[in-house]
Each structure stands twice: as structure tokens, then as C-alpha cells.
Amino acid sequence: MSTEDFTLSFPQEEKVLVTGGSGFVGSHTVVRLLREGHRVRVAVRGPAQQAQVRAALKQTGVDPADRLEFAVADLSADAGWAQAMDGIAHVLHHASPFPPAPPETEDEVILPARDGALRVLAAARGAGIPRVVMTSSFAAIGYTLTPDDHYTEENWTDPDTPGLPAYHKSKVLAEAAAWDYVRSNGGIELTVVNPTGIFGPQLVDRPSGSIGLIKALLSGGMSSAVPVWNFGVVDVRDVVDLHLRAMLHPKAAGERFLANSGSSSLFKIANILRERFPAMADRLPATELTIDQVREAAKAEPALRDAAVLEGRTPDISHEKASSVLGWEPLDVKDSIVATAESLIELGAVTLPGSGGPTS
């Protein structure tokens, strides 16, 4: 069953709370829910996030009418969460801090991610909401390498893995704390979705980490060479679809689900872009660094630490559980990469050669 075949089937009057609604996955979630006629409340830190949500809706042509509202609640504080949960039937917890640069201390990322997840769960449990679907990450599954490079929902990243970035550690510890909370307190179901690198159409020019890679490639920011870096790819629309299936399916309670379409690399992505956008060929890298070169470069460039941790190996990431339990089938990797690039060009975040304007 494809994303397009799955239509939400729950009463229109049931309201869904979305945290992180101004982010990449969250904005697509809000659009999908409203497009299918559902009522949505978005938890935001303030007016700036409200404006970003409305901008995404405008970009997609979705009119929320009276079906969209906002609640002010921050992951780092208790205030507002009880009110945010009032009258809610379903909770999709996407919010998690993603630093634009490596934080000075790990706790800057870990504490709001872990404590925020616990605040959301406690408030949902207090409001009698039956289930929370939480967005974790492949970072919580596959950054402690396995001998065969095969990963399923049974795998966990060891937070003490050498070189593990703070963001990845935050995803591990936040998810582990959420499962511990549910086991210790009961009274609420938890389902977790663990996406790999999320690509797909950008709704506003506010790139996520994954989208930033495509933008950098198309803008010529990696024109000489790219690190050997193999990783999982999944389309944002499929990530949303999996969350919604997990929100509704009885068999999803108490389960983790990997969201992955297939494995790729920066070099393979560059070749996909070269084939689809030949006018940009001169901006795209023609060579790939070795893992030894990556390790050396990562000492000075934090952005390469991900690639260094993975040691150039190609992960085999299974989505069999999501498919067999929830009927989820993702889009092809190539389709997702092309859709990402097309949206960046449409938004003016990247310009075609000869068209003028900035590309950074």
C-alpha cells in the first residue's frame, strides 16, 4: 500500500496535537492532516513558529479555515503542556532540538530532547490521551556498528560510542527515557518512528540537515570532492505517512518502526542530480574522499563526524516491520532526491545556471 493509498480514518472532530509543527516533518504532518479535513493544534514556542507553519500551508495551497490552532509550550519548561493537551485525542511528538552547529556542551541538546519527551508523555497521560507517537531517529539505532551492517528495530546505538555527535546521543537518551517512563508509569501507549536521513519537498526555505546537503551540492559547495558517506534515505511524505499509520493502527502500540527507503551516499546523490539537472554538472563533485581522508578532515570539520563514525560502511536498514505490520511502502530514493532539488529550485533557495540570484 503506497502513501497515496492510505487515507486517514478517524472522526473529524478528534483533534491532533503536533509538536515541532514548524519543522520539516512537522510542517508536512500539519499539511497532510488539514488537507484530509482533520483538526490540528500545533505546540509552538512563540509567534515565529506560528508564522512558519502558516507559510508552509500557503506554499501548499491548503486553507486551514477554522481547523488549525496553536498552543504555546516549550520542551524546556512545564508551563503550557497541560493546556496544550486539553481536548486532544492524538499526539504526534516531532519536536526535538537540532543545533545548527555543534553545541558547547552535550546537555544543551540532550536535556531539552529527553526532558521534553517526558513532559509530553506526562501531560498526555494526565489528559487521558491513549497513545503518543514519537519521532526518534536512526541515530538511536544504527550508530554503534554491527558486524554485518544490518539494522532493525532491535538495534540500539550505545550512547558511549566513540565520536558519537551530541544530537545523536540526544536521540538515544530521549527515546530510552520515553520507553522507561511508559514502562514505569503505565496508563499510556508509546509508538516510536525512527527515520533515516529525511529528504523530499521543502515547504519553506528553512533547510533541515539532510536538505542542506542537497542545497550544498546544487550550490557548488561540494564541487571538488565529497566524503565517502553511506546512509539511509527516506522521503518526508513517507515519514509522515508512517506516523499516521502508527497513530491509528492497534498493532503499533509499544513498537518501534524504522522509516527507510534505501541506502545512498553523497556521491550517488550527486550523480542523481547530475543526471536530472545536467546544467548543474559543473557544481557537482566528481570524486569521493576515502575514509582515511574523512577521518583526518573530521578532526577540524564537525560536519564530517557523522561520516567518520560510520567508517565508510554501507548500512543495510530494514523497513520490513513497517511494511508487514502497517502496510507502509516508501517511495524510491531517486524520486525523493529529485523532489528535494525541485522544491529548492522552486523556492529560490538554489538557482539554475544563467538565471541569476544567490545559490547559498
Image (spheres, helix red, strand yellow):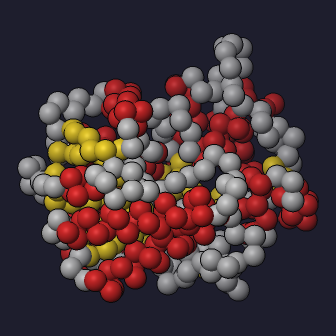
Percent position (x, y) of residue 50?
35, 35
Percent position (x, y) of residue 191?
34, 72
Please tell me how many numbered marks the rendered image carries: 0
Relative to 252, 234 lies left or right:
right
Percent position (x, y) of residue 326?
31, 70
Task: Give me the residue at 38% from left, 69% from top.
Answer: 118
Position of residue 26 relative to residue 187, above or below, is: above
Q: Is residue 151 visible?
A: no
Task: Give me the residue at 45% from left, 45% from top.
Answer: 23
Position of residue 314 relative to residue 301, above or below, is: below
Image quarter of the N terminus: bottom left
Percent position (x, y) of residue 72?
31, 44
The answer to which of 34 and 275 lies nearer the viewer is 34
Task: Give me the residue at 44% from left, 56% from top.
Answer: 76
Relative to 140, 126 lies left or right:
left
The answer to which of 343 and 74 lies nearer the viewer is 74
Q: Is residue 225 visible?
A: yes
Quadrant assignment, res 81: bottom left
Relative to 296, 355 lies left or right:
left
Image quarter of the C terminus: top right
